Image (cartoon, rainbow, N blue to C red):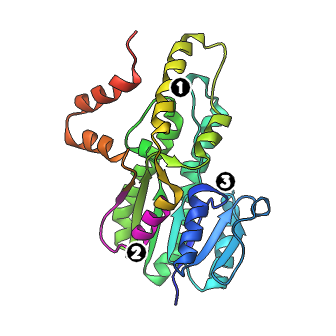
Amino acid sequence: MNKTIFITGTSSGIGQATAQYFEAQEWNVIATMRSPEKQNILKNSERMLVLKLDVEKPETFNEVIEKAIAHFGKIDVLLNNAGYGQHGLFEATTSEQIHRQFSVNLFGTMEITRALLPHFRAQKNGSIITITSGVGRVTVPLVSIYAASKFALEGFCESLSFELASQNIQVKIIEPGNIATNFEQTTKSNFAADEALTDYSDYLKKMDEVFKGIYSGGGSTAADVAATIFKAANDESNVLRYVVGSDLQPLIDIRNGGTDEQYMDVLRSTFVPEN
């Protein structure tokens, strides 16, 4: 029997690319998204089932999971991909924006994971793969809320990996660096700013130039991430974290290879301009 993956957030970017990649590898794919009617890329087929799912509505999860299992017989892998980036000045970020960031990125992931665990325990195997981010390990300015949600996901998954090992359920983390998707454009559209906070004006201009330089250096593609997810889904080792992108690994090496002061000095040299 072909294996089946259940993916959240497949309307675009990494989720969409991963759904296509796994289907091409002859896996069954449950591709979930908030508004299936608004996309025309992923279609129901012999190996693909497109379902409506909003990670902020856990009361709907059991019904969607039941449909998926009824269609393909079982689920082998859960890919927690749904999420977005709330960027901007922390001081300009509203309480509503903060709560929604955690509702989608963290609480939604926790709830869909909880909803699928009984199925994995019943079949005595399964894998939970979660997309975090490079900023879940190495932070940069203007992503404090997003980074906080991703740091929380890292801690959640690492702790969960120990208890679920007792149930023969694997936990894996995918950490993308700079990825060429529409993610950057999406974050710009809801960038937290406040014109009254003029004290930050010079800093924001300087950071705009810094990030333009970072993004202009290119990065991995959504297909690269999908290939890494496929590797993780088939990897029976105890590897927890999979880094995607040559831009991210050197920073993680600095963080892991020296003192905290040395690591912070490296990042401050880029993100704390001299006056």
Residue, disc 3? 56
Q: CA distance from mark 1 to mark 2?
A: 40 Å
Span shown in magenta: 225-242
Which image quadrant is residue 54 in? bottom right
Whether residue 238 is in magenta: the answer is: yes
Instruction: State whether residue 192 appears in this view.
Output: yes
- Which mark lies nearer to you, 1 or 2? 1
Tell me if residue 256 comes above or below residue 235 in the rendering.
Answer: above
Tell me if residue 227 comes above or below residue 48 in the rendering.
Answer: above
Whether residue 94 is in magenta: the answer is: no
Q: Disc 3 marks which amino acid?
A: Glu
Q: Residues within 10 Å of mark 2 (few under 14, many from 20)?
A: few
Q: Residues within 10 Å of mark 3 (few under 14, many from 20)?
A: some
- Which mark lies nearer to you, 2 or 3? 2
Q: Position of residue 97 (x, y in %)?
A: 64, 36
Q: Considering the image in quadrants, where does the C terminus appear?
A: top left
- Label 3, secondary structure: give it: loop
Residue, disc 2? 234
First reached walking from the N terminus: tag 2 or tag 3: 3
The structure residue drawn at horizontal position 49% and vertical position 81%, both measured from the top left corner, is: 122
Quick one: 240 or 180, which is closer to the camera?
180
Q: Are marks 3 and 1 in contact (CB under 8 Å)?
A: no
